[in-house]
Amino acid sequence: MKIGIYGGTFNPPHAGHVKAAGDAVKALNLDKLLVIPTATPPHKELPEGSAPAEKRLEMAQIAFGEVDKAEVCDIELARGGRSYTVDTVAALKEQYPGDELWIIMGGDMFFGLTGWYKFETLLTQVGFAVADRADESEKLQEYAEHMRRELGAKVEFIPERPVEISSTELRRLLENAEGMELLSPEVYAYIIKNRLYGAKAQLDWLRAKAINLLAPKRVPHVLGCEQEAVRLAQRWGEDVYSAAAAGILHDITKKCSANEQLILCEKYGTVTDALELESPKLLHSKTAADMAWDEFGISPEVREAIRWHTTGRADMTMLEKIIYIADYMEPNRDFEGVDELRRLAYEDIDMALRLGLRMSMEDMEARRIVPHPRSLGALEYIERRLEERGL
């Protein structure tokens, strides 16, 4: 068999890696391509904030699953320590005796080949398949001829039209809620769910995921809540991304039945009280918070804003106040007093919160619903604060 060896940190494995793997299989007519995540690179440390080895392995398995004849191999991760290619090749020669091995590499690695650990040994054991970029093709061809003539190296070229992105740049993009298009959908979802690289979910992606979980009639409300939350965040100096994310996700379990809510509580270990168990509709804010935390990599602040958007609580943070009020008065809401609530929300958010809580209590009293003690505590707390201000 003709077997390719494609190593790297894959931190994370992106579209450039996947394309290079597919190009190698076709150009070299490989029978198998072994994708090998590195434990620790031989000449540098993994950057701070890198994904753990087991996560990089799982991402590689997801990313390269779409490449024909590719197989992710954990040989270096299992061995641990510095990943010297000569050691990996020796182990693979034992596993695939008599087979033809080719190391896949970029031009920069090829030019530095003579500096590799025990590179003379490698020359006798493997061939080198080099990505042939148009902008450096002439230099590569000249150097390859030198390596063949002087050192007896076996060299082939892989015509390449690369995806111009580095893992370093991609990690920076992910921190800024960008870069999704450079990853497979499954790898991107994995990164977000596992909170890798400090990644923030892109809002378009988050919105699409949330809409898929909502009853169609609830979509306008959720989009309206997001819109209002963003405006309020801008007005009161709160983080706009956090406000948008909380607005998008606050109702993602709203359509669940009472039994489904309880199942979610068990799944996420959600703490409930007697009143919530008697009125499971109260649970959706808690289960939404826990689902959003588990699936969408949200911050603790966003999680809490979602958790308290229905009942409120004493001493709410600014983000919690924003989501509570945005949910109450988003543009699709139409009830007596909403215009005054909207006016106050941009003049004095505490006065708006007091009005919203009072209206909620009046509505529950009219419908003979027992208010949750947290709502009573929220109203008592905000009334004391406003009294201290003479309001």
Image (cartoon, helix red, strand yellow):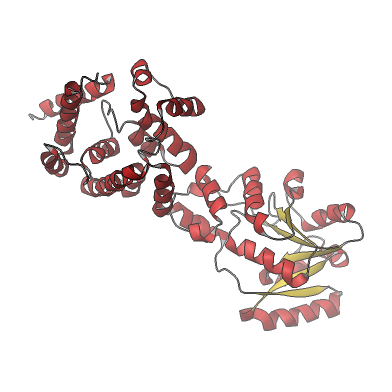
- Asked if residue 375 is positioned above or below residue 127 in the image, the reply reads above
Judge whether residue 49 can be spotted in this image.
Answer: no
Residue 66 located left or right of residue 164: right
Q: Residue at x 32, y 43 (%)?
A: 217
Left or right of 56, for residue 263: left
The residue at the far top in this view is 274
Instruction: Please name whichever residue, 109 or 166, is drawn nearer the observer in this view of the structure.
Output: 166
Residue 110 position within the rendered picture, expressed as x and y whole percent measured from the top left: 72, 70
Q: Is residue 362 above or below residue 68?
A: above
Q: Eyeballing the image, is 149 above or below 274?
A: below
Q: Quadrant of the N terminus?
A: bottom right
**Residue 137, percent from left and from top:** 67, 81
* Apparent side of residue 170 relative to residue 137 in the rendered image (left or right): left
Answer with left or right where residue 47 lies relative to residue 96.
left
Is the C terminus in the top left, top right, bottom left or bottom right quadrant? top left
Residue lying furthest left = 390
- In depth, the one of 84 and 234 nearer the eye is 234
Q: Quadrant of residue 333?
A: top left
Q: Is 34 in front, or is 10?
A: 34
Number of on-image labels? 0
Question: Residue placed at 65% from the left, 57% from the top?
Answer: 66
